[in-house]
Each structure stands twice: as C-alpha cells, then as structure tokens.
Image (cartoon, rainbow, N blue to C red):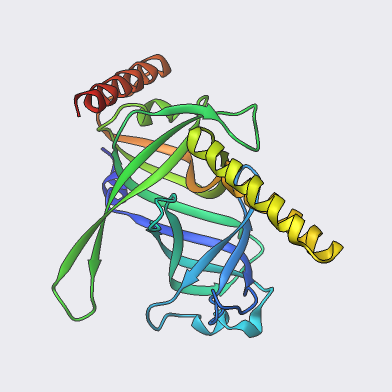
Amino acid sequence: MSDTSSADASVYCATAVGILDFPPANRQNPSRHPHLRMTGPLGGDFRLPVRVTREIPGRELLDPAHHGVRLLVEGRLEWSASPDNAPPAPTLVASAVRPVTPDDEDGCDIHMCGEITGPARIGRHPLRSSIALAQVTVRVQIPRTRAGSRAILTETVRIPVVIPLNHPGTPALLRPGNRVVIEGLLEQASLPRSGPEVEQELANLEETTKQRVAWAMTSEEARAAERDHARRRWEATHTVVHRVVAGYVELLNGAPATIREARELRRAAMQRRAQRQQAS
C-alpha cells in the first residue's frame, strides 16, 4: 500500500463549487438557509444545502447579500434519512468558505474510504441511457472530535455510489466486503418508481383530481388542479436520489470481481432474501 493510500484510508471530505442560492422564505423554510446551485457530473442541476455549526473562515460570504455569487465551500457531507423512508439527502457542513478562482470547477468533489456492503445493481443512467452503471453502497466510518476534548465519537454512514461499467476502477467495487478509496462527484438523479403501491397511489390521485376539477369554481382553479395533478403524478412515479459518481477507485483490501460475478452475487442475495421472507 502506498503512503498516499495510507493517508487516504481515514479521509472523508467534500469540496463544493457553485452559485450561492437562498430560496424564498416560506413556512417550510422561514430562516432561508443557504444552498449551492450546481450541475452534476453527468448533467442535471441541483441545489446542495449548506450548514455552518461554528465560526469558520469566510462564514460572512454565506450571507443573503451574496446571493448569486459563485463560492467554494469545504467541509463534509451529512446524510439524513427522512421518516417516510425516502432516500438519504446530503447537507454540506462547512469548514471553510472562499470566493472561487479561475481554476475552480463547478460541482461537489468527494473523497472517502469505506467498505462495500452488498452486491452491485446494474442499470442505466436516467439522463445518459448510453451509460451502464454499477450501483453499490459504501459504509464509511467518520470520527467526530471536539476542540479541547479527548472524546472521539464514530458515526457510521452508508453512501450510495455509482460507477460506469467500463471504468477501470469498477471491478474493485463489485465484491461485497472490499475496502476502497473513492474520489468522485455528487449528483442528484430522478429514478422511476413502479409496482402495486405506485399504481394505487396514482389511482387515488386520479380520483382526487377529478373531484377537485369538478368542484372548481373558475377556469383558473381547474388549471391549478391540473398543474398540481401533474406535479404529484411525477412525484409518485419518480424517486429523487443523491449519490456519488466515482471517478477514481483504489482497492485497499479484498479482491476485484467481474460483471458476471457481480450479477451472480446479486442473484444469490435476492434468493436468500426471498427464502427469508417465505420462512417468516
């Protein structure tokens, strides 16, 4: 193992470059928390929330007076899961902020080290159907320390990662248990949903919309109901996910696997899950 790999083995950090954005104040966001607006590595714009937990260099740049300014924010990503089992969403906890330089590129770069927790899923990118991807979950151990204290708390997070199948680092991600160093970029993707639950949700939505349109007093109210219907239908049939698109992978422990082996590992995992469900 190289000295660089040894140093990277405990790294978990993020550097984001984007346009400072403050959404309009409303009931859901009365304090107007800052966001960075950026584009994912394979396309698609998204907004990354930024949070400051202490005094940091450049904190004053995250003021609403700087709305629309391009900034670079260093820190780490926190992944929070919602109560309704929605995919985890990241927030950038800032450790430093500065104006961009001509060499800074938009996007959120992530460096991390962790362990592959399960077999890979093979699919296509929703924006680039020509790109076949392997998707895995990486378990990362993040130590927490406090200034002036010897206390160390370790948090375990599971981060979704995708990588093109033709990338040279892909084999290192295809075997569960492998420990790897990953460098990549954050993206937001909309994945289609299907199944009986979605069909029932759509049927309920159609009935509700028919009632709203029938009760509408004006043509504007009817159009508002139809717009709301279109939005809710899209939300019912899509899941918005955040994940890391890996661009560099280094295998620290374990063995690479082929795509055929990855498919076999997933098939075996699905069979074991079905057997457990039947037994219960």
The correct choice, above or below, for 2 with respect to 262 in the image is: below
Q: Is residue 175 visible?
A: yes
For this rendering, which residue is in front, 85 or 97? 85
> Relative to residue 11, is residue 82 drawn left or right?
right
Q: Quadrant of the C terminus?
A: top left
Q: Is residue 190 visible?
A: no
Q: Quadrant of the N terminus?
A: top left
For this rendering, which residue is in front, 183 or 85? 85
Q: Position of residue 192 (x, y in %)?
A: 57, 37
User: Who's the residue at 65% across and 85% down the image?
Assistant: 65
As drawn, which residue projects farthest toward the left? 150
> Relative to residue 59, is residue 102 drawn left or right?
right
The correct choice, above or below, for 123 with respect to 73 in the image is: above
Residue 193 picture quarter? top right
Q: Position of residue 50 (x, y in %)?
A: 49, 70
Q: Position of residue 94 (x, y in %)?
A: 44, 71
User: Who's the residue at 50% across and 53% down the image?
Assistant: 109
The correct choice, above or below, for 172 with respect to 222 in the image is: above
User: Who's the residue at 36% across and 40% down the image?
Assistant: 137
User: Who's the residue at 36% across and 29% down the image?
Assistant: 172
Q: Position of residue 255 (x, y in %)?
A: 28, 25
> Relative to residue 176, is residue 209 drawn left or right?
right
